[in-house]
Amino acid sequence: MAAFNVVQFEEKDGSSVAIVHREWLTPRKTEVFWPPHKRSASFYKCLRDGETVQSDWKLYKIKKIFYSCDDYDDAKEKEKLAEVHSDFEDTQVIRKRPRVLPLRFQNESGEEEETESQLSRPPKILNTAVAITNADVCQGKSQKSRSPSTISTVSRKNSLDCRESSNLPSTSQSNDSVQSRCSTPVTPSSTFSGNQVFQSRFIGLLSRVVEQNKEILHLLKNTSHTPQHTQNCPDLPVTLPLSKFEDFLTLENYLGDSDHQQILSNFLSTLDKTSLVSATNAILKYCVSFRLAKEFSYLGTRNNKKPFSVHILKKVIVDAVKVAVPSSTRQIEDQIKIWLKRSPKSHALEVEKQKKHEFQDSGEEAVL
């Protein structure tokens, strides 16, 4: 037996192809022992030397032995062929058997055409919509250019030709097909009926579009009659931002009316629509000054501060932020807590900034 064998393993082992030594095969040549080498160099050395089977070698089943030889290089070439071809003992290239079409699919002449080895190139893809439009235009022009007398003459000629061909004996299948085609000549009435169907469908679509437009206009008119609040600041009994607690209480009494709450909320929602934080801070700063805000906390439980959450102004601010930037009540309340907590530092910075401006103004007056 040859020293080297090109074998194929079972499907459960990957159906891979490999070269094994004859010493590794079992007596029935249905299984092979595989050396546990991890490096390719050590494996090929073991294969060339025909190392004897050891106890730690694993046993694998083989599906087929492709080739056997004593030359390792020859076995290597056959291994590459075995990965592509299932049988390579014959070096000749196996061609596909010629296929002959049945008689019913052959031409009438009966001449046998040679089978093409390659498929023909597919036709060029054209724009279907443009092609159909051009065909319709050309058909319309041809119909307009023909007069009724010309159409009737052509139809009579076709009918006479069909009668003459019907008197002749049928010699082939093609003559029968020609007669069947001539038996149904194209008339202007069929074209006219097709145009009527198209016009009826087109008119139906136009009527639907008109109805939809009427519904849209009706909805727009209804929305235009909805009450729109003015974008200007409403007339309030106090001036914003509030700087005194007495003014704060006056505004609370004014906001006891739900209409006043809605008007002020709609106006405040137009101040800033950038983000939740920006809108909340802008509305709070517009309504309450830092000087008054430092006297409040959200719940009023520490440092003898007044609770802000129990007042109507808090509800108005929450509603305004929801309109400006859609968000939850919890998110808006959390941002109000942060703003009130930072109000003492903001007031200190505001006072310091005001002093700097006063000092600069006094210096400029002294120079003058």
Image (spheres, rainbow, N blue to C red):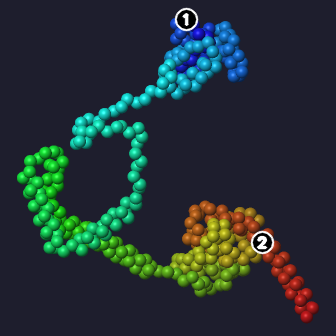
Which x, y percent locates residue 258? 52, 77
Decide: is 310 above or below 116.
Answer: below
* Precedes in sequence: disc 1 or disc 2: 1
Which x, y percent locates residue 240? 67, 82
Residue projecting furthest to the right: 367
Q: Which quarter of the figure has residue 5? A: top right
Q: What amino acid is labelled 1 in the image?
A: Pro
Q: Is residue 366 left or right of residue 250?
A: right
Identify the secondary structure beneath mark 2.
helix
* Residue 27 circle label: 1
Identify the secondary structure beneath mark 1.
loop
Q: CA distance from mark 1 to mark 2?
A: 95 Å
Decide: is 196 above or below 360.
Answer: above
- Please report the residue visible at 57 percent of the width from the left and 21 percent of the height from the top: 78
- Please report the residue visible at 22 percent of the width from the left and 42 percent of the height from the top: 108
Q: Is residue 364 visible?
A: yes
Q: Which quarter of the figure has residue 245? A: bottom right
Q: Nearer the viewer, mark 1 or mark 2?
A: 1
**Mark 2 lies on residue:** 346
| Quadrant holding the N terminus | top right
Q: What amino acid is labelled 2 in the image?
A: Ser
Q: Is residue 130 left or right of residue 359?
A: left
Q: Nearer the viewer, residue 117 or 185?
A: 117
Which x, y percent locates residue 151? 17, 69
- Please report the residue visible at 38 percent of the width from the left and 64 percent of the height from the top: 130
- Please report the residue visible at 50 percent of the width from the left and 23 percent of the height from the top: 91
Circle 2: is it few (<14), some (14-19), or many (20+) Cα within 10 Å?
some
